[in-house]
Image (cartoon, helix red, strand yellow):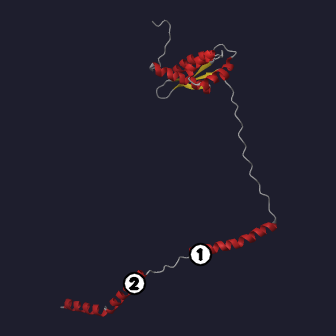
């Protein structure tokens, strides 16, 4: 029989439900605040508050019991050294639930689970940007010397650019020379046979006239 034993399943199997609640409590101890559904926040509160009361008596047995839930040595030491001193004046009510509204999609009621007393984290001021260095004005004599030194350098750069722009002459290979000579000889043959082509045209015209 149940005998006033309250159990909320959260629509999960036992192992999965325990794992989710442990992870929620871990994140609550690290960040001091979590956002989740209202049903899960109520169940996480039932796990977190007994651990805070347990941390008020610093002993080996208490640390072992806390480690069986949190399974993290750094988090256990934080619970006993940093979190428990915050609630010395309190005997209960270490956390509070603030309702947020309904979640988009499934319409689940959302809530914030947070500590009632928190450690204040001071934000360090941002470093100011270094002021730009102002160059000192140079003397007229130094400016004239620099301009005179720049003139021959500019002339040399212009010469180098002109040399780069000039295309290099291509020397023909012996094979290309032979091909060129062959083309010239063929052109000469065509020019010599122009009269022969005229006579052939005349013959065709005479046949057409007949």
Up/down of 164 relative to 197, above or below: above
Between residue 193 and residue 202, name the one nearer to us: 193
Q: Earlier in the sequence, mark 1 or mark 2?
A: 1
As drawn, is 5 to the left or to the right of 188? right
Q: Quadrant of residue 87?
A: top right
Q: Can you tell which of label 1 and label 2 is closer to the viewer?
A: 2
In the image, farthest residue toward the front = 60
Q: In this orientation, does residue 100 appear?
A: no
Q: Position of residue 189 (x, y in %)?
A: 33, 90
Up/down of 191 relative to 128, above or below: below
As drawn, is 56 to the left or to the right of 168? right
Residue occupying the point 79% across, 66% down? 142
Up/down of 82 relative to 6, above or below: below
Q: In this orientation, does residue 15 appear?
A: yes
Q: Position of residue 197 (x, y in %)?
A: 28, 90
Q: Which circle marks residue 178 in the picture? A: 2
Q: Position of residue 169 (x, y in %)?
A: 51, 79
Total residue callouts? 2
If the image is split into quadrants, where does the C terminus sit?
bottom left
Q: Which residue is mark 1?
A: 163
Residue occupying the point 33% across, 92% down? 192
Residue occupying the point 65% across, 20% down? 80
Q: Secondary structure at mark 1?
A: helix
């Amino acid at each position: 029989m149940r005998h006033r034993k309250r159990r909320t399943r959260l629509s999960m199997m036992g192992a999965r439900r325990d794992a989710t609640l442990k992870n929620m409590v871990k994140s609550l101890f690290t960040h001091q605040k979590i956002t989740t559904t209202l049903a899960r926040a109520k169940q996480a509160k039932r796990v977190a508050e007994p651990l805070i009361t347990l941390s008020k008596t610093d002993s080996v047995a208490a640390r072992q019991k806390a480690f069986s839930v949190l399974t993290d040595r750094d988090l256990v030491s934080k619970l006993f050294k940093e979190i428990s001193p915050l609630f010395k004046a309190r005997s209960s009510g270490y956390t509070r639930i603030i309702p947020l509204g309904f979640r988009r999609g499934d319409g689940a009621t959302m809530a914030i689970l947070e500590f009632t007393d928190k450690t204040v984290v001071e934000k360090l001021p941002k470093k100011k940007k270094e002021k730009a260095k102002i160059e000192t004005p140079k003397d007229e004599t130094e400016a004239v010397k620099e301009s005179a030194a720049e003139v021959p350098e500019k002339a040399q750069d212009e010469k180098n650019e002109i040399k780069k722009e000039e295309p290099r002459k291509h020397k023909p290979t012996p094979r290309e020379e032979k091909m060129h000579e062959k083309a010239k000889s063929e052109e000469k043959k065509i020019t010599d046979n122009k009269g022969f082509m005229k006579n052939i045209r005349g013959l065709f015209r005479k046949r057409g006239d007949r």
